[in-house]
């Protein structure tokens, strides 16, 4: 039986999955050597974050057949990273994470090209993100997730039947961990819920009432937050508190101790002070490894179709036993970020005022007293009076000009609709297409990001 | 799920032919929600709102409260609002820029208002906060003090509290603190 | 030298200095250092495990570079154990790392006593026959054993140890013990000193809900022949009574009281889980009993006598709306009771030790204190011998899994992993391991799987064709992402077992990399 020996190959194990046909696979699966080679040559992956998850992701992706990877992270390496961010050593402390991580993986996995970007995610132009086939997120902030999500969703185009156009879908794979718990999810904008559709999954941070801090502190955390939020401003008028300045932290700790002694409250420690003030999330290597591995595997499956994809949210909890659960969340069809919005065709000559009137009669909208905004610019605001006044002069201008003469684009409107005789206010996304502009006559391209 | 490579190559050629398009500013979900808040804003009579950065920056604005009754009648109190990108998941940061002798506002401008911290919920809006602020001036509350001295006086000696409030609003000194005048001179 | 402490800051926040000390004392043996084993150790080395011994008899070939980050070009032809060990050492020089170039199967066969020197053995990529043998060796030597295996898009993790006892299980959510349904005299007395009908609105809204509930419960009991609310209607009335005591609409302490009122109604006494532990035959202690069971015996005695059917109080109270003074006083009362309960348990522990002819002070005060604080959260985990599970699994569970849609893929893989080992024993290779058409292997694997099922007593039930095809397609490949996942799980369980904190998984974990509906099978 074992008389035939395959020639030695680096992708010995991966080949089994990529070269052989299977029954439980994605609809795009075309097994063969070409798939393996295409994956190496054409697939471009962006890893956002080079921390606990990011380090693992880079390793996992580099060993899952991807050769073109970029990584973006604005942070520098700290000593507290070393218990899990395995690409960093003590002598790397202070260096940019993205650069060191990229270098280390390239040193060990030959043929892999990793381009580091040592900057904030907002520093990159939007088209930068469109160059990648899949964006993988290893972040610890919902704000950054929300930003990347909005960027990825902005590439999404819908056809005239409100179906997402396949080639404009920018898949995201998102991981997150906290202690022994974590999640991994796949976001196919327009197909599965985007980050914004399920924002409620992230509970808001607990905030103590200021008067409790000022008058009736009961816990060590109350004493620390008093020093941090009230006493600091009182003593250092104007000077901003810097959580990364050890002297600032020490000051808060000393004040918290004083306050705790005054009230007879136990438990203030330097470690707790840092934890409360910086909102430190405990983190360990194993959980990051598990979640990153799940994310990397999904990335491979999305890109190659070599198996089914996760639908669509996995939670892991290892606190008591082992619990892995997959939940299929549904998307919010009216989501302002990933939803199709209402398609509206207009003549280039239509003024903003006429457009607003038009919305009142539009059968899908019936929106009266609309305020209109376009890519962060407020074209017209009905209220408050001061904004109305500032935007009133736009009313007589053609919408096409106000939208920088773009043939098709998204705008947002807010106003009131009547539903069952009751007036409710609502915020809607519209896809505006101007007729007979620059050859955009074909309904097929009437998308609008 | 997606036919990655072939499609991708084709698309690249297309987008090159189209010339890409201008770099665009992203409008966050928070900004959109704020637009909605403003379009349905129903300011109380005693409040005015300003946008110091112009019509396209709604994330930073100022609200002036000029109470028409109570201890703080005729004073004018300026609040700055900083709306975070994760609004309404997170509440706006509000500071009082006018120094005021008030049980629920300290001398650094921190405001003890439940909807700004522990009781904030994404269903609330800017209107809720502004109403909360006006309420603080009509009914200062000595039970949840931030300025201990003011709270104690309000509880134990409302008359003296009232005269201290007057004094502070006229730009006088209460305790160790000099206050800036916040009553507009009707003859100015 | 504060650096290690800073370096480990993010994990010390989870398992504390004690957990860290346990890790630093542990010695781990790894069998086979493919990606599954290497990744398991990587996570432990980063966290500062005491020592590792890597055992693998193979030399590095080019294919290994494609799935193992610990190996690079320079390692080809070298001992795999040596190369992996060198990289792991680079990650953390505080760890003592060594390797032995030897096949695990050989060691299992020729040198079983070798394994007794370790705290824990991580056995990766072993086939059934070796698993069974090693399991017996480790059980005998009382060494904790974890099996981990990656196989295409599936894999398994299984713990094997006779008994693992946990004091600090640290559950995410655990109901506090305020004894509002069963207050002790000092707590009652404290409540009596506070007038909840105080006129001053500030004092009224800063009366802690614990006091409010105690007082209102007493008032209720007086008008209901001494009993507490029990029917739904009574509970509703009790909440109404609470609400009637408010004097302003925004009294947070009363809102908290209404929300916490169930603590007044809840039944007294210990949980079923704890009852099971004190009823365990191990609680009948002998001179060879572990400290844990000696303390359980003391706990049992306490509950039966002095504790009035309650576990010792843990002494902590949640944050609640309150004046600082009331809160701090309340804290002191709970802590005093917890201390009294502790002293009583400690006395019992010392007496039991003396009776058993052991040194009465051989269990430290700190350990007994921790035991008391966590008495309501104690855990005992036991694991079957692999051989017993393999030859005599729970048929009812197996049949349930095979017919349950959520479990069918996972249990299918479980059967197929066993079938693949049987296949390998018969044909000297795994199904689909080598290139060429898969048809023959598919039909052979199918026959083998049917054989496995019928040996288990599940005649007539079968594994789907699709899954058998997949298994052959996998061809025993060890994919990096799957290995990293399995290795991650294995290392997480190692940490829980070594630190004796949190609760390790039970049963056999089967990874399902197709749609991630992985499952734990209790067979």
Image (spheres, rainbow, N blue to C red):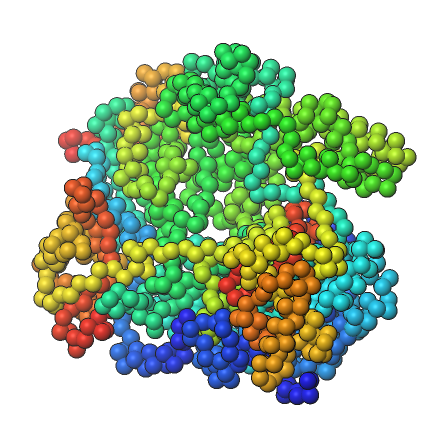
Q: Which of C229 and C369 is in front in this view?
A: C229
Q: Is residue A350 above or below residue A220?
A: below
Who is closer to the viewer here, C379 or A286? C379
> Residue sitting at 47 percent across and 46 percent down?
A241
Figure quadrant of the N terminus of chain A: bottom right
**Residue drawn where x is 35% and y is 40% of the image:** B95
**In the rendering, at what x and y percent does residue C356 appear?**
88, 34
* Left or right, C297 with reference to C7: right
Left or right of C127: which side holds B62? left
- The answer to whether residue C52 is visible is no
Indicate the position of residue A117 as horizontal and vertical percent values: 47, 69
* Quarter in which the C terminus of chain A is drawn: bottom left
Whole-percent x, y for residue A108 in the image: 61, 76
Q: Identify which residue is drawn at 60% across, 56% down.
A: C399
> Front-most of A199 and B157?
A199
Q: Which residue is drawn at 72% across and 66% down?
A: C128
């Amino acid at each position: 039986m074992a008389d035939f020996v395959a020639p030695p190959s680096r992708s010995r194990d991966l080949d089994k999955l990529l070269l052989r046909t299977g029954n439980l696979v994605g609809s795009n699966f075309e097994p063969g050597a070409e798939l393996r080679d295409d994956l190496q040559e054409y697939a471009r992956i962006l890893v956002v974050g080079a921390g606990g998850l990011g380090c693992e992701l880079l390793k996992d992706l580099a060993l899952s057949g991807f050769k073109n990877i970029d990584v973006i992270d604005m942070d520098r390496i700290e000593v507290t990273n070393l218990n899990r961010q395995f690409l960093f050593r003590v002598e790397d402390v202070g260096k940019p994470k993205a650069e060191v991580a990229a270098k280390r993986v390239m040193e060990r996995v030959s043929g892999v090209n990793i381009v580091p970007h040592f900057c904030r995610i907002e520093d990159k132009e939007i088209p930068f993100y469109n160059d990648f086939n899949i964006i993988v997120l290893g972040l610890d902030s919902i704000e950054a997730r929300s930003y990347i999500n909005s960027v990825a969703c902005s590439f999404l185009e819908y056809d005239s039947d409100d179906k997402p156009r396949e080639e404009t879908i920018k898949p995201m794979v998102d991981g997150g961990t906290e202690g022994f718990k974590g999640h991994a999810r796949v976001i196919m904008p327009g197909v599965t819920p985007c980050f914004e559709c399920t924002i409620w999954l992230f509970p808001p941070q607990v905030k103590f009432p200021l008067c409790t801090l000022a008058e009736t502190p009961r816990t060590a955390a109350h004493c620390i937050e008093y020093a941090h939020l009230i006493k600091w401003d009182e003593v250092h008028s104007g000077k901003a508190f810097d959580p990364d300045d050890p002297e600032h932290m020490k000051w808060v700790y000393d004040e918290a101790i004083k306050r705790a002694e005054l009230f007879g409250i136990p438990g203030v420690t330097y470690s707790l002070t840092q934890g409360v003030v910086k909102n430190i999330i405990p983190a360990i290597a194993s959980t990051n490894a598990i979640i990153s591995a799940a994310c990397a595997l999904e990335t491979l499956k999305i890109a190659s179709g070599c198996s089914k994809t996760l639908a669509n949210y996995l939670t892991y909890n290892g606190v008591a036993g082992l619990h892995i659960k997959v939940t299929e969340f549904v998307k919010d069809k009216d989501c302002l970020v990933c939803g199709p919005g209402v398609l509206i065709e207009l003549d280039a000559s239509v003024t903003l005022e006429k457009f607003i009137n038009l919305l009142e009669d539009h059968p899908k909208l019936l929106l009266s007293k609309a305020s209109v905004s376009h890519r962060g610019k407020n074209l017209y605001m009905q209220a408050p009076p001061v904004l109305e006044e500032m935007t009133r002069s736009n009313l007589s201008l053609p919408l096409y000009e106000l939208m920088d003469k773009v043939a098709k684009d998204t705008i947002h409107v807010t106003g009131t609709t009547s539903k069952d005789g009751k007036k409710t206010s609502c915020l809607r996304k519209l896809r505006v297409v101007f007729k007979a502009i620059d050859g955009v006559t074909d309904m097929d391209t009437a998308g609008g990001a | 799920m997606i036919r990655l490579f072939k499609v991708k190559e084709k698309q690249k050629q297309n987008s090159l032919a189209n010339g890409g398009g201008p770099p665009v500013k992203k409008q966050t979900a928070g900004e959109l929600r704020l637009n909605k808040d403003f379009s349905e804003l129903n300011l109380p009579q005693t409040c005015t709102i300003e946008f110091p950065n112009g019509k396209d920056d709604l994330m930073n604005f100022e609200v002036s409260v000029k109470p028409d009754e109570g201890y703080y009648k005729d004073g004018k109190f300026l609040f700055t609002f900083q709306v975070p990108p994760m609004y309404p998941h997170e509440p706006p940061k509000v500071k009082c820029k006018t120094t005021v002798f008030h049980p629920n506002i300290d001398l650094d401008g921190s405001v003890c208002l439940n909807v700004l911290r522990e009781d904030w919920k994404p269903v609330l809006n800017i209107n809720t906060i502004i109403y909360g602020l006006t309420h603080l001036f009509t009914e200062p509350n000595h039970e949840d003090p931030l300025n201990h001295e003011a709270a104690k006086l309000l509880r134990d000696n409302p008359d003296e509290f009232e005269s201290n409030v007057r004094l502070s609003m006229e730009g006088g000194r209460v305790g160790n603190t000099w206050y800036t005048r916040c009553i507009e001179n009707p003859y100015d | 030298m504060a650096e290690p402490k800073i370096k480990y800051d993010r994990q010390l926040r989870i398992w504390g200095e004690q957990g860290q000390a346990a890790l630093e004392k542990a010695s781990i043996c790894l069998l086979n250092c493919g990606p599954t084993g290497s990744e398991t150790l990587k996570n432990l080395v980063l966290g500062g495990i005491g020592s590792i011994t890597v055992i693998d008899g193979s030399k590095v070939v080019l294919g290994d570079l494609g799935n193992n980050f610990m190996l690079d070009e320079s390692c080809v032809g070298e001992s795999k154990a040596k190369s992996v060990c060198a990289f792991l050492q680079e990650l953390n020089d505080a760890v003592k790392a060594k390797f032995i170039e030897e096949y695990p199967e050989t060691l299992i066969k020729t040198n079983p006593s070798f394994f007794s020197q370790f705290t824990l053995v991580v056995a990766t990529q072993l086939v059934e026959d070796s698993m069974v043998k090693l399991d017996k060796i480790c059980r005998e030597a009382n060494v904790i054993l974890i099996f981990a295996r990656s196989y295409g898009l599936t894999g398994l993790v299984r713990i094997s140890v006779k008994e693992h006892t946990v004091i600090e299980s640290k559950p995410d959510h655990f109901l506090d013990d305020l004894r509002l349904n069963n207050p002790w005299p000092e707590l009652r007395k404290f409540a009596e000193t506070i007038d909840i009908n105080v006129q001053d609105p500030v004092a009224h809204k800063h009366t802690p809900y614990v006091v409010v509930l105690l007082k209102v419960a007493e008032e209720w009991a007086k008008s209901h022949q001494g009993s507490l609310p029990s029917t739904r209607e009574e509970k509703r009335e009790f909440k109404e009574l609470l609400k009637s005591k408010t004097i302003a609409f925004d009294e947070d302490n009363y809102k908290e009281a209404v929300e916490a009122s169930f603590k007044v109604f809840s039944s007294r006494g210990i949980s079923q889980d704890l009852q099971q532990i004190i009823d365990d035959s191990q609680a009948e202690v002998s001179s060879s009993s572990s400290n844990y069971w000696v303390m359980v015996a003391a706990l049992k005695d306490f509950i039966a006598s002095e504790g009035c059917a309650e576990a010792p109080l843990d002494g902590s109270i949640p944050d609640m709306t309150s004046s600082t003074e009331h809160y701090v006083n309340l804290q002191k009362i709970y802590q005093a009771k917890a201390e009294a309960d502790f002293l009583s348990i400690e006395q019992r522990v010392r007496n039991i030790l003396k009776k058993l002819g052991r040194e009465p002070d051989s269990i430290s005060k700190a350990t007994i204190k921790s035991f008391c604080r966590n008495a309501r959260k104690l855990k005992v985990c036991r694991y079957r011998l692999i051989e017993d599970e393999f030859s005599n699994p729970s048929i009812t569970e197996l049949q349930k899994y095979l017919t349950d849609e959520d479990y069918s893929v996972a249990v299918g893989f479980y059967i197929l992993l066993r079938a693949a080992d049987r296949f390998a024993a018969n044909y000297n290779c795994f199904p689909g391991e080598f290139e060429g058409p898969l048809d023959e292997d598919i039909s052979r694997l199918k026959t083998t799987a049917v054989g496995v099922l019928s040996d288990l007593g599940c005649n007539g039930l079968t594994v789907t064709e699709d899954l058998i095809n997949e298994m052959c397609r996998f061809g025993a490949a060890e994919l990096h992402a799957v290995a990293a996942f399995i290795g991650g799980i294995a290392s997480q369980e190692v940490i829980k077992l070594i630190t004796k904190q949190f609760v390790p998984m039970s049963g056999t974990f089967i990874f399902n990399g197709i749609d991630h509906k992985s499952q734990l099978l209790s067979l």
